[in-house]
Amino acid sequence: MKNLLVIIVLVLSFTAFAQKNDVAELKIKTSAQCEQCKERIEKAMAFERGVKSSVLDVETKVLTVSYLKSRTTPDKIRKAVAAVGYDADEVPADPKAYASLPPCCKKPDDPDHVDH
């Protein structure tokens, strides 16, 4: 019985250690413009497989994503941001998703862009 407890503790410790080493952080430059963009992108990331957390800094337009390397990749995360309608580093926004964004979320050089 004592040996079984030792084995369980070791397995749990190894699992926690392995998960900690599986977590990575990714910074993505986006085309986000405002707080609505922040809410939209962070909400989409919450449903993305393997993403543990995400925070968009509206001022710098940088999205910081904490994710599990065993469950997703930086490329998949960038594509998920693009699918919501925003540029993600070198991955351009999906045209249909971008077209459906509110005017305040459009890029400043877009004729449909409206400031708050």
Image (cartoon, rainbow, N blue to C red):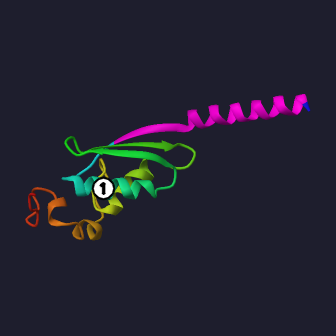
Image coordinates for residue 100, horizontal then vertical, percent: 24, 70
The amino acid at mark 1 is Glu
Q: Residue at x 42, y 51 (%)?
A: 77
Q: How many marks?
A: 1
State yes or no: residue 22 in magenta. Answer: yes
Q: Residue at x 76, y 31 (%)?
A: 9
Q: Is residue 87 left or right of residue 11?
A: left
Residue nearest the observer in this picture, 115 or 95: 115
Q: Is residue 51 left or right of residue 101?
A: right
Element on which disc 1 rests: helix
Q: Which residues are magenta?
A: 2-27
State yes or no: residue 71 in magenta. Answer: no
Instruction: Point out the image quarter for the C terminus.
Output: bottom left
Q: Which residue is mark 1?
A: 39
Instruction: Point out the image quarter for the N terminus.
Output: top right
Q: Is 74 situated above or below 3?
A: below
Q: Is 5 situated above or below 107?
A: above
Q: Is residue 37 left or right of residue 80?
A: left
Q: Is residue 73 visible?
A: no
Q: Residue at x 24, y 58 (%)?
A: 36
Q: Is residue 26 visible?
A: yes
Q: Residue furthest right?
A: 1
Residue nearest the observer in this picture, 24 or 92: 24
Image coordinates for residue 49, horizontal then vertical, percent: 51, 55
Residue nearest the observer in this picture, 3 or 85: 3
Quarter occupied by residue 10: top right
